[in-house]
Image (cartoon, helix red, strand yellow):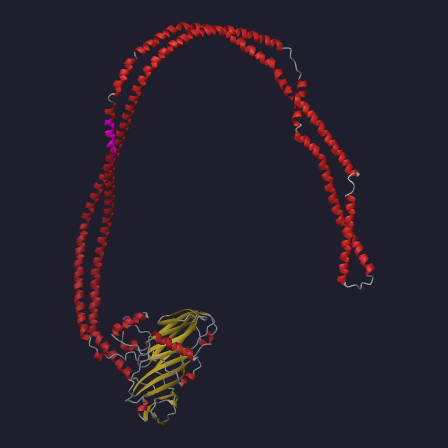
Amino acid sequence: MKSMKKYAAAGAAVLLTGVLTVGSAMWSGSNYLTAAESDPDDKEKLVDAIEEVGTNTQASSSDAELAKEETVYVTADASGNVTKVIVSDWLKNAGREASLSDVSDLKDIENVKGDETFTQDGNQLTWKTAGADIYYQGTTDKALPVSMDIRYELDGNQISPADLVGKSGSLSMTVSYTAADLPFTMITAMMLPVEHFQNVALDNGKIISDAKTDIAVGLAFPGLQDRLDLDSEDLEFPTSFTLTADVTEFQMGPTMTIATCGLLNDMDLDDFEGMDDLKDALNDLSDASKELVDGTGDLKEGVDTLQSKTGEFKDGVNTLNDGLNQLQDGTGTLKDGVNQYTDGADTLAGGVNQYVDGADTLAAGASQYVDGTTRLAGGVTQYVDGACTLGTGVKQYVEGSKSVADGINQLNQALSGLDISKEDLNTLNTLVTLAGGLDDDTLNQLRGMSGSINAGIDQYNAQLQQTLDSTLSQSLSANLTPAILDSIDPSGSMPQEQRDALAASIDSGIAQTVTGTLNAVFQSDPASPLKGEVAAAGNSLNGLADNLGSMKTGMDTVKPLLAQLPNLQQLPGVVGQIKGGMDQLSENNDKLTQGADTLLQSSPDLKNGAKELTDKSGDLKNGASALTSKSGELKNGANTLSGKSKELRDGAGSLSSASDQLKDGGNTLSKGTNALVDGIGTLANGAKDLNSGMKEFDETGIQKLKSTFDDDIQGLLDRVDDISQESKAYKSFSGIRDDMNGSVKFILETAEIK
């Protein structure tokens, strides 16, 4: 089923114009409200909700003419079955006639707003208006031109309203309408408290919410579909609506429905002047549609031609892309070669610079070498002279070493009688160790031990005195205090507060006595046996410390001598080792004497060689100068060559980068070409579909619309005009004079479900 927006749009297209005219309720001040069981405020809210959906009050007569406005108020049970019908009539502008004739088939007629009276002859009523409008109501039991039916389902199963009370689950409520002769517009509103209704949905209508209550307003048009003789595939006017919700402990107030047959009353097709214009527009639309068909055909042919050329274009792009790839490879190779060339040029320049620097260094070194050879020749002469002197000194040294060896032998014999026993040495070492351990701090600690002993005795006495004081005081208080109290108050008549104060005083006296006694015992004469023994022990420790001090002084005196005894004991062995070394030295003296003789013999040859070296130094110095004379030109040429390397490298890099960009562009072009080919293919398919669709649209849409208008629209408009005229003629439900204008609406209220 189409949505309400689709209904409205489709209805406007088919009916061309229309006004939904459903009057609001007019029961404010009418007696039938007081007869209703529901809250009037709730009814007002429901009517306001109906008006918000799109209805309004629309009188069928001007303010000056005589008219009858009628409201049919219907009460029904929760399923929509009618239980009572009350009709309220307003004779508008009745004061124009002193005696007003009226027609009505109602029973139990009564004036609900004034004192005006009437006479009745069958259905003919005559009112004495007294210059005022007449408001009256009555009842009827004749059939209504419209009816409603409400069906309830809970969790998919049909259920009666009475059984639904207090239930929870998924609710489906379908409201269906039936119209007898004329098509009606039906609008139903219901209040749904959120405490009982959640997730409310409506297929044909609107939900209005104020956070505490949802108001559901449903809409339907019973009878309109059949009277217009429309195919439901083209347009469907609903005859019912369905409400769904999740309910908790279900209960619901009454529903309020307003029904009117004035949907087409505002249409006056006789005055409609747009038919010819509409026909002309449809003819133009038909011609334009045919031109569009031809245009889409031309577009399809052009796109087909474009698609046929995409192969050639793609091949050209691929060839271009291959050439760009080769260009990139070549520029890469060129860049690598340039880099290798410039690296070699830089290396060459560096080598030339190093060579020139080396040549300069060589020339300077040659000059220094020549100077050095001159100095070397002088040094060799001095060396030869020294060698002669050295030979003489060696011989003197050999003679002196023999005298030292003789002295060592004599010392060794003198020390052979020295003998110190190991036991004596250990004893002396023990004394040395003992002397080192007796320092002033140790002696002072010994002297302080007596004071520590006295302090320990005093601390022990204090702790013992404190313990005895506490124990004796508690024991005496526990035993003596009760006995003293009993002797003072044997009958126990003393007040408890006074007795407690006396006990505290006795306990305090006992504590003071015990403390004083213990002080006399523990704070006695220091010459007591315990403290006397402690003092004697302290004196002994002080004497020991003094004796050890004297011992330390003596040992400090002999300590340096004792420390040398081990070295004296080892002296004979050391002298023996020296003697052995001197013996080996004597054995090598002959060799030393022979070396000195050889040195003296080779000195003339060495002196001649130094002279020859200085003779060739001039040639070497001249050659070094010639080597450096061309170094500047060579260095400048190498630097010029290297200076252009960066420009060459940058140029090769730029060329390579540009070739990379060209290759990327070629790849992008290639991919874009594929996308273009695909796009052209899609475009071709689209052009084909467009042409085909345009043909179908023209044949089944535009041409059919034109044909439909030519063949069917006039008939539809005639049916709409018939319905409109019948709706205008339906001015009252209970009866009305032929010459009186009127309007009628129906208000249906269903019973609450609680």
Q: Position of residue 114 (x, y in %)?
A: 38, 90
Q: Quadrant location of residue 18?
A: bottom left
Q: Is residue 271 above or below residue 285?
A: below
Q: Does 643 appear in magenta? A: yes
Q: Position of residue 85 (x, y in %)?
A: 39, 84
Query: Quick one: 636 or 234, which is closer to the camera?
Result: 636
Query: Quick one: 282 or 339, which is closer to the camera?
Result: 339
> How many marks overall?
0
Q: Position of residue 463 (x, y in %)?
A: 73, 44
Q: Where does the N terminus fall, quadrant-wise?
A: bottom left
User: Viewed as shown, does residue 676 lie left or right of 748?
Assistant: left
Q: Does 695 appear in magenta? A: no
Determine if residue 465 is in view: yes
Residue appearing at x 20%, y 70% in the figure: 706
Please provide the residue range marked out in magenta.
636-646
Q: Is residue 195 above or below residue 565?
A: below
Q: Position of residue 441 (x, y in %)?
A: 66, 31
Query: Quick one: 739 or 296, which is closer to the camera?
Result: 739
Residue appearing at x 37%, y 86% in the figure: 88
Q: Main secondary structure of the magenta part?
A: helix
